Image (spheres, rainbow, N blue to C red):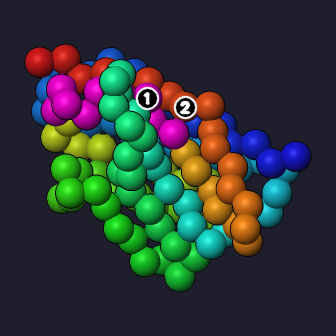
Amino acid sequence: QVQLVESGGGLVQAGGSLQLSCVVAGRGFSFSTMGWYRQAPGNERELVARISANGDTNYGDSVKGRFTISTNKARNSVYLKMNSLKPEDTAVYYCRMAFGSAEKWGQGTQVTVSS
């Protein structure tokens, strides 16, 4: 059974940095896309960053130039490096894996940015 396990969330001051990690268990690291999404209270879940199997990336407009998505096949992992964090980045961050017609989500990790 495929499981995605996120880690790295926490509390950080505005202007600080965090790196989120998502480890894929129960399946080889073969995917069509891996992505990070976030959801703040009262808001819909939104795309933060996504990477395709060929390495193409795309980012949500609000995080361009501040966040970077990357993968490590040897560690079955995808990362999200977040710099210059803002209070409006506060949300639960979810990892998503798409493979074939299927998808899998992680349980989410809380990121809180204080002003």
Q: Which mark is residue 92?
A: 1
Could you say which is closer to the camera, residue 8 or residue 41? 41
- Find residue 61 and report its horizontal and vertical position in percent: 21, 57
Q: Which mark is residue 50?
A: none
Circle 2 residue:
108
Magenta stretch encompasses residue 34: no
Q: Quadrant of residue 31?
A: bottom right
Three-letter amino acid code at the position of disc 2: Gly
Q: Quadrant of residue 68?
A: bottom left
- Magenta part of the chain: 86-94
- Find residue 66 and report its horizontal and vertical position in percent: 20, 51
Tag 2–tag 1 contact (CB < 8 Å): yes
In this view, 3 is above or below 16: below
Question: Looking at the image, which residue is at 11% across and 18% down?
Answer: 115
Q: Secondary structure at mark 2?
A: loop
- Find residue 102 and report its horizontal and vertical position in percent: 73, 61
